[in-house]
Image: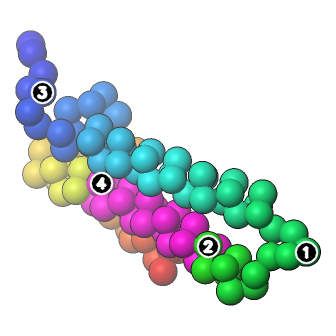
Amino acid sequence: MAVNTTRNDVDSPTGHDPEAMRKVMNRLKRAEGQLRALTESIGAESNCKDVVTQLAAVSKALDRAGYMIIANALKSCAVDDADGEGSHDGMTADDIEKLFLSLA
C-alpha cells in the first residue's frame, strides 16, 4: 500500500504533519540563533532597550512554535475523530486545550 505523498496532515507514522514540523524546526532554529546572538552581545555596554526587544522576539518565536505544534495536534485530532481514533500522541482534546492555555 503506497502512502499518498501529497497529503501532509497525518501521513507520517507519528501523525505529525511533516511540513508543519519543518516550519516549527525552522522557527526554533531562528529563535536559537537570536538567543545565542543576544547572550553573546550582553555586557557592560549593552543597551537595555535592544536587549529587551531581542528577548521579546525570542519569546514570541518560541510561543509561535508552540502554537504551531498545538495547531497541528488539533488538526490531527480532528482527522482522527473523523476516523474514530480521537487522540493525538495519546492526548485528548482536553489535554491539547490545556497545552494551548499554558502558552496563553
Name the residue furthest top. Answer: 1
Question: Residue at position x 12%, y 45% from top?
Answer: 83
Mark 2 crowdedness (10 Å alpha carbons): few <14, some 14-19, many ≥20: some
| Circle 3 or circle 4, nearest the eye | 3
The mark found on residue 54 in the picture is: 2
For the residue pair 16 and 18, the one nearer the viewer reads as: 18
Q: Nearer the viewer, mark 3 or mark 1?
A: 1
Looking at the image, the residue that sits furthest to the bottom is: 49
Magenta extent: 55-74
Residue 56 location (% of width, % of height): 58, 77
Q: Callout 2: helix, strand or loop?
A: helix
Q: CA distance from mark 1 to mark 4?
A: 42 Å
Q: Secondary structure at mark 4?
A: helix
In this rendering, position of residue 43 left or right of residue 33: right
**Could you tell me the amino acid type at mark 1?**
Ala
Mark 4 to mark 2: distance in Å? Answer: 27 Å
Residue type pointed to by label 2: Gln
The residue indicated by pointer 1 is: 44
Work out whether residue 67 can be spotted.
yes
Q: Which colour style is shown?
A: rainbow
Q: In the image, which disc is placed on residue 72?
A: 4
Left or right side of 43 for 66? left
The residues bearing labels 1 and 2 have C-alpha atoms spaced at a distance of 17 Å
**First in sequence: mark 1 vs mark 2:** 1
Q: Is residue 85 left or right of residue 66?
A: left
